Amino acid sequence: MPRATIADVELYFELHGEGKIDTQQASGAAGADTVAFINGIAMTVQSWQPVRERFVDHGFRCLLHDCRGQLRSGKSLHRPFSLQLHAADFLALIDGLSIDRVHLVGTSYGAEIGILFAAAYPERTATLTLIACASELDSLMRAAAESWSIAADCGAVPLFRCMLPWAYSNHYLAQNRELLLAQEEAMSHQPANYCAAFKQLVEAFLQLDLSAELSRIQCPTLIIAAEQDLIKGPRIGRQIHNNIAGSEFCTLVGAGHAVVLEQPQQVAERTVQFIHRHCSC
């Protein structure tokens, strides 16, 4: 399993698709079109699989990684997490892989990292796709995140149960009960430091204040909202759209906050079409 040592932490990453970089000698990769996916707060690289497969089918190279504190990466609990720290980690990761520019696709927590990265490093960001994203906290987001942190004190399974109604639409919950029960069983085997790291991820999210960064984004940008997202729904997505010059906006009908998991084919279709209009491929 490939890992990159970034400052004080090891990041788990995966590369898929044509032009895949030799991780031992990562040279000659700068000209390839790379789509980089950044996880939501409770995701791991596997969560992107159906979306990633669609991009590979279209000839893109795909880079995925777990942020520090997430499932397969180092936890680095000795220092506070921040969105700025995650963005710096990501820059170091692509530097180490000799990737000059990326089409950045992030959802929720990962999209918020994407805002920071695109604003700070416009020369490294070919396009930006923000899914189920916010640029600042409101009272509902704060209440939800604080409840997750409290649930994490009780263990991974209570945390999983607490997040379910915030993450998914009613339809998805009804149609996927067995799948979700299997995921709950898997959560029961997480190591003890999983919840401690998750709480630090929540603390980083609770510092969310990125609205001033939106006007700095120069690359083509797509904002995708989910119709039934309780915490970062279409109203919030439109606010971001209205503050990024030239951005595009769409709403996916019938999906909750975890739209990447509920409607991966629709997410992939919208994003592939968008990136194809703005890439060298």
Image: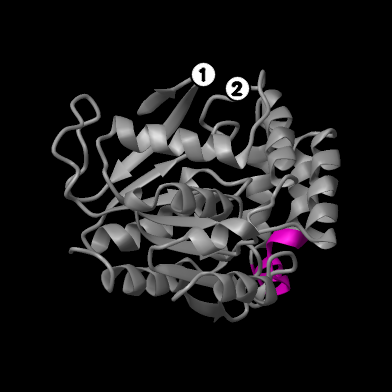
Q: Nearer the viewer, residue 239 or 109?
A: 239
> Can you name the residue that lies furthest to the left here?
28
Q: Are marks 1 and 2 in contact (CB under 8 Å)?
A: yes
Residue tagged 1: 8
Q: Could you tell me which secondary element the residue under label 1 belongs to?
A: loop
14 up-or-down from 79: above or below:
below
Tell me, yes or no, if residue 198 can be seen here. Answer: yes
Q: Which residues are magenta?
A: 165-175
Q: Whole-percent x and y of residue 27?
A: 16, 33
Q: Nearer the viewer, residue 14 or 29?
A: 29
Q: Whole-percent x and y of residue 30?
A: 19, 44
Tell me, yes or no, if residue 226 can be seen here. Answer: no
25 sits left or right of 138 in the view: left
Residue tagged 2: 76
Tally of numbered tags: 2
Which is nearer the N-term, disc 1 or disc 2?
A: 1
Q: Residues within 10 Å of mark 2 (few under 14, many from 20)?
A: some
The residue type indicated by label 1 comes to Asp
Q: Nearer the viewer, residue 78 or 2?
A: 78
Task: Give the residue drawn at x 72%, y 32%.
Answer: 195
Task: Give the residue drawn at x 51%, y 29%.
Answer: 73
Q: Residues within 10 Å of mark 1 (few under 14, many from 20)?
A: few
Question: Which quadrant would residue 238 be assigned to in this image?
Answer: bottom right
Gap in Å between the C-alphas at discs 1 and 2?
A: 7 Å
Q: Could you tell me which secondary element the residue under label 2 belongs to?
A: loop
The quarter of the rendered structure image containing the N terminus is: top left
Task: Give the residue drawn at x 79%, y 34%.
Answer: 155
The residue type indicated by label 2 comes to Ser
Q: Whole-percent x and y of residue 217?
A: 46, 60
